[in-house]
Each structure stands twice: as C-alpha cells, then as structure tokens.
Image: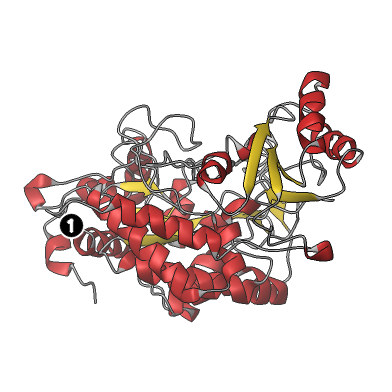
Amino acid sequence: MLKNNELIKTMTIDEKLSLTSGKNFWETQELPEKGIPSIFLADGPHGIRRQEKSADHLGLNESVKATCFPTAATLANSFDKDLLNEVGKAIGEEARYQNVNVLLGPGVNIKRNPLGGRNFEYFSEDPYLAGHLASSMIKGIQSSGVASTVKHFAANNQETNRMVVDTQVDERTLNELYLLPFEMAVKDAKTKVVMSAYNKINGEYANENTYLMKDVLGNRWNFEGVVVTDWGGSNSRLEGLKAGNELEMPGNEGETNRELKKAFEEGKLEEKTINESVDRLLSLIESTNIEKPDNTLDFDAHHDLARKAAEQSIVLLKNTDDILPIDKDKKVSLIGELGETMRIQGAGSSQVNPTVEESLLTKIKETDAFNFIGYERGYKRFKNRSSKCLTRKARKLAGKSDIAIVVLGLDETREAEGLDRTTMKLPDNQIKLIESLKEVNDNIVVVLTVGAPVTL
C-alpha cells in the first residue's frame, strides 16, 4: 500500500513524472497546487557545499561557507564511531541551518586501488570498518531532520573513465566486499537516500541494474528510501526508473519527463512503477521539509570539533630514537609550503569553503612548547621541479635547528574527483628537498598531509 496514495490519486501523469527529475541543478520540482514543496540537495561528505549561484558538481565554483571537517580518509584513522556520530550531527545541523534537505554523503566505496583519485573521500579498504563508521555518521546527520545519502552504489572504485568503465565482479565478492558498507548504512543507519554510481557493473549501468536496485536494495535489504542518480549519471531514464532509480539529477527542463510520458503512452512504462517512485519521493520530501532554526549556529564549536576530530585521527608512523615529543629547549624550524598553506581536503564535489582555515605555521608561532626559530617554503606545492633558491634557504634554516619539521604531501591536483593518480610517489621536488636537508641535519620530523598512500 502506498503511503501517499490519496495524494497520488489526485495527480496527473505529467505531475507525477515532473517529480522524478530535478527542477534545476540542486532542487527537485515542486507542485504548489498540491502542497508539494521542492527540496534542496547539496554535496557534503565532510562539510556542506551549498551553492547559491554558478552551480557545478566538480567543486569549481565557490559555495556558502561551512565548517570543513577532516575527510573520511582521516576520520577513519580514529576508529571512533562516537566521534563520527558527533561530526555527522554537526554537519546535519549546518545543513539544516542552510536549508539543505538532502546531504550527498557519506561515500563508502572501497579503496580497492591505492591510486584511486577519490580515496580521500572514502573511509577504508575494509568494508566492515567503512560500514560501521558510515552508519555512525549517517545517524548523526539524520538526527537533525536532514536526509543522508550513501554513495556511490556500487563498485565505483576508480575515477578515470568512471562514466564508461565496466566493473567485472563475481556475486560473492560483490556482496561481501563492495556492498557490505551500503548494507550496513541501509539496515543499521536507515539512510533515507542512496546515490547510484556512474559505472557499469557486469555490463549494465549501475542505475539500471535490476539485480542491484530490486533484488539487493529492495527485496533483500528492504530499503524504503529514494535512489538518486549521480549528477549526469542517467543513461536511459526509462530503464533507470523501471529498475528503481526514483530521482534523476540535475534537471533537464522536462526532456526526460516527456520521454517517460511517451513510454507510458506506448505501454512501455506501467503507472504502478511511476506511483511507487512518486510515493517514495513524497515521503522523502515530507520527512525533510524543515525550516531554518531561529537560533544562530555555533560555528566556533564546530571548528573546535573539527580540530578535535583531526587530532584524534593523526597517525604516528614512526618515532626513531624517541624524537617526539619535542623537548622544550630544542630549537625547531618548520619547512615546506604545505605547512603554510595546508592541504585540508581533496578537489571535486566535496570541496568545502571553510569558515575558518588554520595552518601549522600559524599554530606553531603561537606555541611555547619549544623554541621556534623560523619557517622556509622549501618547495612549490603545485610544481614538481626543485628551486635552488628555496632549497638553499631551507638548508640554511635546517642547519641552525636542533629539529626540522618538514611538511610533505600531495596537492589538490593530485587527489581529485574524475582522475586517478598515476604514481604513489611524492613530488620529485619534495624528495630532493628531504635528501638535501639530511646533509645538514639528521633530526628531521616529516609530517605527511595526504589523503591516500604514498611511497617513502
């Protein structure tokens, strides 16, 4: 029995079909005469990316300022479900504050290849860990009345050629490895939305894959929410809707609605299928029809939480001769441009416009934990070529230091949506800098700021 049967009975085919495709880039279609409002969807695995103008799904244009929390790759290092729930709750509060109904996150795809360009946005290569952490975050997000979207369903494990790649996977591996985090998000966290992936799975596009959508998601997991396409991820709208992909985003000025109506008139699309999709959409709209709270949001508290989450997710890889913690009387220098302009996130649809952005350099200048004697850039973060001038200045500073803290890592162009990495190496100019600094100082502490594995 449809939950919204009485309302659906009053709607024409055109009205029903209009709800299954977006009004514009970020909003669903409204039907004021039926009392049906539009809802706003926004990116946000680790912070809200609500765009008011110049909409895009690649993070190219600026969004409304929001707290930038550590990415999933960092948060997973904490192994702390309570922390993930706390972060999710804060993100949900900010989504509600910005009148966002549906948050497009978290992502739970498995890190199957260390070169995956979007690995920073996913939790783990372990499906059990990814599922538990995602579930905790989803519960936090949805506690504020905002719908969470688990993505990208499924087997979306590379960025290069992601629109056309065909993932070949046997049934056992698909279910035990790739689908487990989604299953936990659906069954345990009761996520309200699932986003289908761009790629094919065993020859069939994910959003048209009846095994995934009907057999697994619907029949086996009893998912009662809405499946939304990834932006531009609809191949055949007719086959997608029949498989159970209720909402197509973004909008296309009714083009696919007309295609669906023609299919309906020709007997290729049953009204029962349309009604079931509309029923789910109406339930989502009703459950997220929220108003902006009257009170002012405490962004300072959220920034403190982001710092706490980062602190609890730092990993100490090595501590030769107990060089850490640093003694108070030691003369310490900071070297590396990534220590001044910090790498806090990857590039793409998850890119947050931070309310506050701190750097290691500014915080070290404030500390009295040791004797800080200076900073040098050392290298250019967006280049792969060494600078003799920068290297010479860095060597001079390191030579005067008891301990040199050197910040290395990858820039945003090396970890980005839509493109996989080609190597696990750090940039050549950073490696050459370290080799040069070792000649003048044996006491070097390397701080890595990366969202994916690198060779050292």
| Residue annotated with mark 1 | 290
Q: Residue at x 49, y 80 (%)?
A: 220
Can you give x and y, in whole percent of width and height, for residue 455 in the image? Answer: 83, 51
Q: Quadrant of residue 105?
A: bottom left
Q: Residue at x 11, y 53 (%)?
A: 294
For this view, does 202 lie left or right of residue 221?
Answer: right
Residue density around tag 1, few if under 14, some if 14–19, many if 20 or more, within 10 Å: some
Can you give x and y, in whole percent of width and height, for residue 25 in the image? Answer: 36, 37
Q: Residue at x 84, y 40 (%)?
A: 434
Can you give x and y, in whole percent of width and height, for residue 269 in the image? Answer: 38, 55
Image quadrant occupied by the N terminus:
bottom left
Can you give x and y, in whole percent of width and height, for residue 260 in the image? Answer: 36, 46
Vertically, is 150 above or below 117?
below
Vertically, is 438 above or below 295?
above
Furthest residue toward right: 439
Give 409 or 320, whichever is nearer the viewer. 320
Question: What element does badge 1 sit on?
Answer: loop
Residue 176 in view (yes/no): yes
Residue 409 in view (yes/no): no
Vertically, is 196 above or below 217?
above
Q: Amino acid at mark 1?
A: Ile
Give 71 or 264, whichever is nearer the viewer. 71
Q: Quadrant of residue 204?
A: bottom right
For this view, does 64 lie left or right of residue 216?
Answer: left
Give 345 or 160, whichever is nearer the viewer. 345
